[in-house]
Image: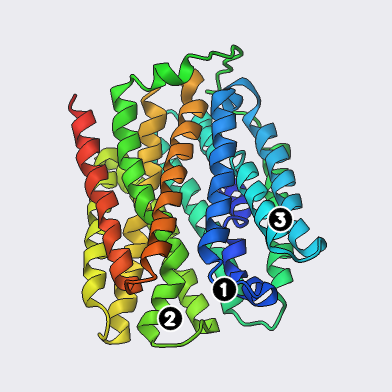
Amino acid sequence: MILIVIAQFLGTSLWFAGNAVAPEISQILNEPEILATITSVVQFGFILGTLVFAFFSVPDRFSPSKIFLVSSILAASVNLLIVVLPMQLSVVLVCRFLVGFFLAGIYPIGMKIAADYYQKGLGAALGFLVGALVLGTAFPHLLKGLDLDFSWQIVIWVTSGLALLGGVIVGLFVPDGPFHKINSKFDFRLLTKLSRISPLKSAASGYFGHMWELYTFWAFVPVLIVFFQGNEAMEASDSLLTFFVIAIGAYSCAIGGVIAKRQGSSKVAQVALIGSGLCCVLVLVASGLPSWVWISLLLIWGMFITADSPQFSTLVAQSVPAEYRGTALTLVNSMGFALSIVSIQFAQFLLEWIRIDRVLAMLFIGPLLGLMLFRFYKHQ
């Protein structure tokens, strides 16, 4: 399991590499306000990739370890093209889109590999695995926050190298799990069949509420920190704080997984969803308070906002037969990330008229609806 976790961290470090260097790219291209666009194209790529993988049942028809290896190589390669090709906005966006596409063969496939190793204790296993994703997501902000006086290209080179290493680890040292079942047939009706499973719809509904909030919070937490600090531009210390706010979610994913072994994934997921929804509301009163107050709030929010993700994924994996598990995980990921794009773009739109703290407070709609629908389908 430790090798899967390490590889997941290394591979998903690509996810927010573009966000970490967005200010520098924006300055070079003289293109202001590209943060939401860079974030969204990665999400679009991931959505298309997961849709393709789900439609053709790729995770269930082929070796997940080999898919992870090939996807890591391709994702690392297209990420590097940003520094190799002439600097143009179209080039950056296409490269980041392709990174998102190939991440579809890393994140959900990593969960599929873990599910093939653990029939019992899957919530704990996915807690550590998603925690690795969270840490990988935060890592580019750490590189930037350390203020080591290296160029933005170094962030791209380092994250690409890490992703490549992660793919090699899985490809060479992590064979397919003992509970892996190959579904060799391609079934056009599979997605329709999955849509009729109530436990799957329940878990997916909670996951969608979580996704409405998560990536918008991650994308705009640097902006929120600058606002709370009262600065004109982002400083190295702000990037470092951003790292801690995101990275602390790795800890909560792991702890939530351990608790889920005793209390069940459903309870952990619901508590985390309620907690993150409350943080959305509390951010409205944080402006102007001492820095330790709003920093504490952001750290607590960073913990709650991620702790439900591995538990909802566990419920998804447990709601379907083993031979459909990879397709179900990939499909739910695809739909959740599609929702995250709507949320990110809506937040960017609202920022034209509304302060960032008030914009992010509106994210509470996601946890609220997610919790209601999760309980509705659960009791059908």
User: Which quadrant is the N terminus positioned in?
Assistant: top right
Q: Tell me which label, 3 or 2, sits earlier in the chain.
A: 3
Residue at horizontal 62 percent and vertical 28 percent from the top: 176
Q: Report the residue at 47% width, 48% height from top.
A: 130
Under tag 2, what secondary structure? helix
- Mark 3 sits on what residue? 79
Alpha-carbon neighbours of circle 2 within 10 Å: few (<14), some, or many (≥20)? Answer: some
Query: What label sits on residue 226 in the rendered view?
Result: 2
Quarter occupied by residue 74: top right
108 lies above or below 242: above
Q: Disc number at residue 90?
A: none
Residue 282 placement, left or right of 180? left
Q: Is residue 325 left or right of residue 318?
A: right
Q: Earlier in the sequence, mark 2 or mark 1?
A: 1
In front: label 3 or label 1:
1
Image coloring type: rainbow
Separation of residues labelled 3 and 2 (CA atoms): 28 Å
* Quadrant of residue 353 within the rendered picture: bottom left
